[in-house]
Amino acid sequence: MPHQESNPRVLPHSSTHILPDTVDATKTRNELDHGYLVICWNDPINLMEYVTHVFQVLFGWPRQKAEHHMMQVHENGKSILKREPKEKAEHYVHQLQKYSLHATMEKDA
Amino acid sequence: MKLVDQKGNQYFFELSTEERSVLFDIVGLYPLSPSPRYGINRTISDNDGDTNEDQALLEEALMDYRMEQRQRIHKLFNQNESSDNWQQTKSGYRLELSRVEVEWLLQVLNDIRVGSWYALGCPEDHKKPSLDESTQSLLPYHWSMDACCYFQMVFLSVTLQS
């Protein structure tokens, strides 16, 4: 039974050797990179309705969820909006700043 | 200013002559601040090459974006050119905006409002200005903050309804 050939991770002539784990390595790298927090900070200038609206537009959130995060910003000083790979986190920070919101990103500890 | 009609994604607002004049004056202030006000990372350091590079790219992109916005504003709010969006009525003006344009104007007005706030020194409470000589030059920023808020609330109520 050619079980070895059916398993791409096992060398065809040895059941004890395993190919370099490229698939897992990529996955691990992605997982590690998937660790940037997009944070929105409170400021005394942006209207609460406006902040809620921006969250809805940018993230496609329902109003209730957007309001929840807006209230977190308002009451706690900040809200973690997303946890994303670096590039996507940068994209969101850029978009939030386009809307004049105080947004930053931080590597998740 | 108030919403008087909606057809699909097109919105029709009615403005008095004074409101139109104020709106023209406000958007003429854009962009108040050509550079972004916040860093991409709150704890940015000079030694962090990647972050500095990201920051520079972000600033460049935002500056380009603001310049594009400026051109759009010029097209929609140019007293000397006729615009399909504006129509004079018996009581004032009718402004037709698509959903995308409403969204865009919201951003522009907020940018001006936040820029005015920065120009005032980021006061914790936006109080009515005192009318002495030292603060006279700041009066336009107080005015633009209030005026932007007025128009923003109308646009926000429209987005909330739809």
Image: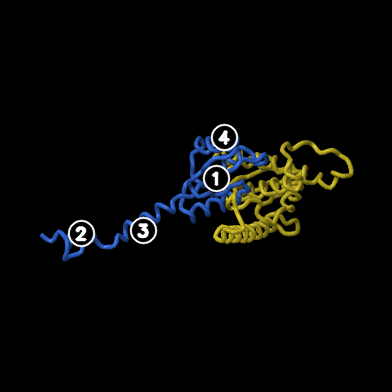
Chain colours: A blue, B yellow
SS of the residue under disc 4? helix
Q: How far separated are the C-alphas under marks 2 and 3?
A: 18 Å
Q: How far separated are the C-alphas under marks 4 and 1?
A: 14 Å
**Amino acid type assigned to the residue bearing label 2 in the image:** Asn
N-terminal of the pair, mark 3 or mark 4, is: 3
Q: Residues within 10 Å of mark 1 (few under 14, many from 20)?
A: many
Asked if disc 3 and disc 1 are in contact, CB closer than 8 Å, the reply is: no
Q: Residue at x 59, y 33 (%)?
A: A75
In this figure, which residue is indicated by the disc labeled 3? A26
SS of the residue under disc 1? strand
Name the spot of residue A32 as percent of width and height, x first. 42, 52
Residue A7 is labelled as 2
Q: Vertical placement of A71 versus B24: above or below?
A: above
Asked if disc 2 and disc 3 are in contact, CB closer than 8 Å, the reply is: no
**Amino acid type assigned to the residue bearing label 1 in the image:** Ile
Most foreground residue, A88 or B85:
A88
SS of the residue under disc 2? loop
In this figure, which residue is indicated by the disc labeled 4? A71
Q: How far separated are the C-alphas under marks 3 and 4?
A: 38 Å
Residue A39 is labelled as 1
Q: Are marks 3 and 1 on the same chain?
A: yes
Name the spot of residue B148 as percent of width and height, x first. 70, 44
N-terminal of the pair, mark 2 or mark 3, is: 2
N-terminal of the pair, mark 2 or mark 4, is: 2
Most foreground residue, B102 or B92:
B102
Between disc 4 and disc 1, the foreground one is: 1
**Amino acid type assigned to the residue bearing label 3 in the image:** Thr
